[in-house]
Amino acid sequence: MKKVFLCSMLGIVMAVAMSMFVWANDPSAELPKIPFGYDSYKMWDKWPQQRLGVRAYMRSTYSRTGGNRSADASHYLFGNEETYNVSLDVKGTGSLYFFRTNHWHGSPWHFVTDGRDNIVQETGTFDPDTAKATYRDRPGDIKFHPSDQFPPPLALNWGTTKGADLIWVPMPFKETFRIAYSRTRYGTGYYIYHLVSDPARLTREVKPWNLSQMPDPEVVQFLASAGTDIAPKNIETMKKSVKLDKSSVSLGEIKSASVVRALKLTLPKSKAIDFERMRLRITWDDRKAPSVDAPICLFFGAGTLYNRDNREFLVKALPVNIRFDNTKDVVELACYFPMPFFKSAKFELTDIVPDAASPVEVQYEIRYEPFKGRIQDSSYFHATYKDMPTPTPGVDNTLLDTQGIEGEQVWSGNFVGTSFIFSHNAYLGTLEGDPRFFFDDARTPQAYGTGTEEWGGGGDYWGGENMTVPLAGHPCGSRNKELAKDPKDLIQSAYRFLLADLMPFGRRAVINLEHGGENESNEHYESVTFWYGLPAPSLVKTDVLDVGILESERAHQYVSPDASGVYSLVSRFDSWGPDTINPRTNVERYPHMKDFLGKEVIPTHEEKGRTTKGTSEFAVAVDPKNVGVMLRRTLDYSYPNQTAEVFVADGNATGDAVEWKKVGIWYLAGSNTCYFSDPRPELGLRTPEVITSNRQFRDDEFLIPSSLTAGKSKLRVRVQFVKNDQQLLPGIPYPKESAWSEIRYDVFSYVVPEHTP
């Protein structure tokens, strides 16, 4: 019996020791699981959670030469048979979280997960030439096929959104994912997907999606609850009223580590417009600057509280809403973003213009619960306001640059949405501007869309109509000046919120939006950008290998026996908009552009690099406390469909101790050559026009899990080129053969962010 007891105790001690060893050598063992798939909705209270080892990308059919050809539609990476035109092609492990097209265009669509083709259609596919006339007055007849797999509001058609088909159904994949259009006419689209470094750190197993899988009814019901109070009810509550009798009033303070789950304001309906520009200000943990400081109308999702059609809901979104209660003659504004803090929170209303004769009274409610968990796994909620009255010709509007916010140079967290005014003059043409988002100092945007109303969940400028759905909307603004019922009706605004499709960043986020198709519009923009951030990095640059610079190659033990000689390349980065301000810009419409026509806005620069069709090996430094590693490669994108197997080994091992382990496939679809096809009529065969952009530089990223990097200070990386014979189109090869291009490798270590409030 003693012997059994001692063996049992020995086993427990060994297990504990092994656990301690794993934790000491792999800090990721202590990290919380990352919500994945439908859990991203069900665990919406984890919105603020750090997502170490997750990268988000938004890809689209944008015009590859930087302009706005065909409203950024119908640009394809490559194609096979007539009904197979590829607009997205990914290798790795992750999930598609969002898909958007203009109406039914491109349908039937191929969603190919791990090689399995799932074909989805939309009602308009069957009679596209008359679809608008047939279904405009019967939006309920517009459906996806099969319909049970795409129920509203998890998937919405253009009858509801006023111009777009939207799918938020998560589509996980283990190895590969592809989207292809059967028809190329006006094939516009953008898609948001995540890649993950380590599936073991997810809340659920990655099971490749297919059409036999039904959506989670709990998630469908959750999204359908937009406009209701979705936050926990039986928790601590501050519920009071305050008179707006001075320029700034306090709504109270909380002095314990908590999470705000609901924040509500109620204004008299007759006074709502008068006070729509007062600001909500929230300061966390006695920080020097507030993290929330925004006009209340934009914070709660609309550019104004003017309600032209006397709708009950001006905004009926999931995280925020604006409701007009005619029975009580009040306007209710509610926010349900989880807002954690770790010591204290101070709530204020500022920029008030008091009515001295009859001070207005505002009711407010703040519900909160104790904060649980570790600070380093969470982040502060931010709503950052930006006023852009005179956009710079040729240059994107920057809605947010986290560098320097609140006096902090580095932030890690998640970008989760925007609420923005794009015109004070009812001008919809400015909506041709594309969203471009840059994370962690990348020079190629990880997110590039096809237009502003597309970002806001619409199409064709929402047909000039208003709409509000759980995660996107165009809540206010008349179709044009002539139809405006009030000067406030000229204010055009939109919102877009990210939940499952949120975009993590590890050190910096730059959220840009083009003003007009080529940054020529002079409309007055205002924005509130919603994001979570902790003032500490979760992604640290630990090394840089400059291929083609001999000193750097030697320092990193770079060996590539089959590599080309060093060559110099003078070009621009892909996805940065037009090179110059278009000399054909309509100066009658945009007289402010007269002195800027032809001005260069994206200059060329020179880089050195190599290509190989063999193997490259090199050694790089990483942080021993890493919870994974990200490689970012700067490359020459004129080489198509670059594919390689990636292996790693301990960089400090020598001789027989070197053990190579395969990580996965590093793949970048397409090249700076694509084809454009926008045939007429709708059912016409594709009319491909080969287009080669003058932009050859591009950044691309690859994730390595902590199981292969934890505890190591140095990694040896082997990249083995894999030949890819994909043609641009059958019988039409790319201008160059596939090869692996190397200009620079930036090495980043994921680390647990450290913050003491």
Image (cartoon, grey):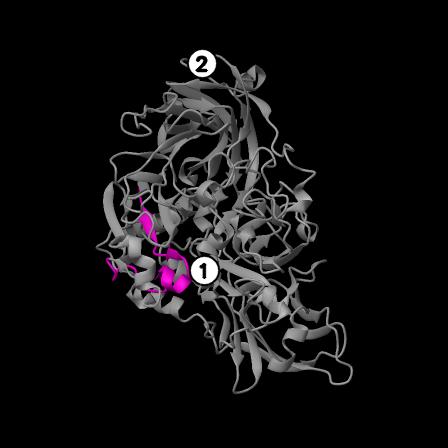
Q: Position of residue 374 (x, y in %)?
A: 53, 57
Frontmost residue, 536 versus 428: 428
Residue 617 included in the magenta stretch of the image: no
Residue 161 included in the magenta stretch of the image: yes
The residue wearing badge 1 is 463
Question: Going by the picture, which residue comes out furthest to the left?
Answer: 212
Question: Going by the picture, which residue comes out furthest to the bottom?
Answer: 327
In the structure shown, which secondary structural element does the residue marked by tag 1 occupy?
A: helix
| Residue at image location 60% in from the left, 81% down from the top | 269
In the structure shown, which secondary structural element does the residue marked by tag 2 occupy?
A: loop
Q: Position of residue 70 (x, y in %)?
A: 44, 43
Q: What quarter of the picture does the N terminus occupy?
A: bottom left
726 to the left or right of 345: left
The answer to the question of whether label 1 and label 2 lie on touching residues, with beta carbons closer than 8 A, is: no
Q: What quarter of the picture does the C terminus occupy?
A: bottom right
305 to the left or right of 446: right
Q: Position of residue 603 (x, y in %)?
A: 61, 29
- Is residue 151 in sight in this rendering? no
In this picture, is 627 found above or below 276?
above
In this picture, is 418 found above or below 244?
above
Three-letter residue code for mark 1: Gly
Three-letter residue code for mark 2: Ser
Q: Which residues are magenta?
A: 146-174
Q: Nearer the viewer, mark 1 or mark 2?
A: 1
- The mark tally for this picture is 2
Q: Is disc 2 surrounded by few (<14), some (14 to 19) or many (20+) residues within 10 Å?
A: some
Frontmost residue, 552 versus 683: 683
Sequence-first disc among 1 and 2: 1
The residue wearing badge 2 is 564
